[in-house]
Image (cartoon, rainbow, N blue to C red):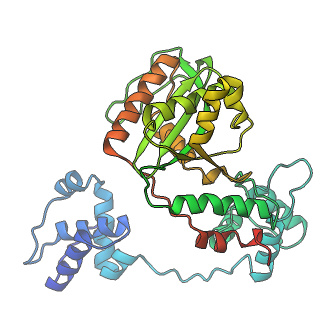
Amino acid sequence: MASYKVTLTKEERSMLMAITKKGSHKSIKVRNAYVLLNCDSGKYGEKKTNKQICDILKIGSRTIDRVKKLFVEDGLDVVLKGKVSGRVYKKKIDGEAEAHIIALSCSEPPKGYGRWSLRLLADKAVELKYLDSVSHEAIRQTFKKNELKPWRVKGWVIPPQQNGQFVADMEKVLDVYKRPYDRDNPVICMDESPKQLIEETKISIAMKPGQDKKVDYEYSRNGVCNILMANEPLTGKRYPKITKTKTKQDWAVFIKETIDAHYAKQDKITLVMDNYGTHTTGSFYETFASEEAKRLMDKIDFIFTPKHGSWLNMAEIEINMMDRECMARRIGEAEKLISEISCWTENLNEAKKKIHWKFTKQDADKKLAKHYVA
């Protein structure tokens, strides 16, 4: 390749320096700016050899020569922005075809298919003669522009439209969450979730610089335990417990232990929880003597989240956080799980980490309007 000499003016150097120091630019633009600055043989530059530039920028000598050639033959704008192609590309998917494809993606997929894929949509669009031919990449670009992802499905349970009971129970929960902190009647949220005990069968390979931690696909399943969680959102306290089973008695004992250990001085507590079959006042009478069951009943003001509305329970958020921060790994023994959860709980309780609830009645009016009678 012929030798090309780069000579920059003072203004060109200033512009290139600005590109390398601030702003949001494509990596190739920043790289070319660095190359030109280091190749500048003008009176403002400090020219370096190709080898020195290669060592600094970690690029090949041919790349440097190509940038220099482009600068000399086509100018600075082409180096930074690229050549403008003279070709005019005809848009393959016009507005009419795009509308057909979007409508197709919102319909049921052909029999034998669980969902629409990009390739399936491309084949179907040609079969239905929306287009003579089209690639799955062109379909993808169409969906990207319209912010559609027909191959993705989110799980969500939606109650029937205009479900008065759902609205009533939801607003009752939201009213409770609006209350200011009351030391004599604190709001406690409660939820529970199963956890599989998974044990490694082979020793993992520790993470090293440039290498991820490696765990073997093989594992041993040591059964399932149950995690019960009570949390007080306004004070940043949480009280988990691990049990072997998930029965009415487990729930009743957990509620009693939580009250006696942390709320013995309060005359009343407000307990928000999901309406599970085990979460009933009758569970107290099936577990304790009638006097003790009555004492617990008188102590608690029960607030149940609506059916299909467990997302209104802040204890569910607490369990999800614990799952991500503490339990997102293989733990094969209940004793170790108890120990790890205890450490996690102690740290968060000491820091008084709170849940900042933002969903209000006004949000419900906007997002769940279809569940209200017009």
Total numbered labels? 0
Q: Quadrant of residue 369?
A: bottom right
Task: Say which quadrant the N terminus sits in.
Answer: bottom left
Task: Say which quadrant the C terminus sits in.
Answer: bottom right
Residue at (42, 26) in percent of width and height: 340
Give x and y (percent) for residue 293. Answer: 64, 31
- Check the image and report above or below for 82 versus 122: below
- Check the image and report above or below for 243 versus 281: above
Q: Quadrant of residue 151?
A: bottom right
- Check the image and report above or below for 318 versus 337: below
**Residue 211 in sight in this render:** no
Give x and y (percent) for residue 79. Answer: 34, 75
**Residue 18 in sight in this render:** yes
Residue closer to the observer: 213 or 27: 213
Give x and y (percent) for residue 78. Answer: 37, 79
Residue at (38, 47) in percent of width and height: 353
Residue at (57, 21) in percent of width and height: 198
- Check the image and report above or below for 230 versus 373: above
Residue closer to the observer: 88 or 13: 13
Residue closer to the observer: 200 or 289: 289
Query: Would residue 71 appear left or right of 368 to someone viewing this image?
Result: left
Seen from this angle, which residue lies furthest front? 291
Query: Would residue 123 appear left or right of 365 to someone viewing this image?
Result: right
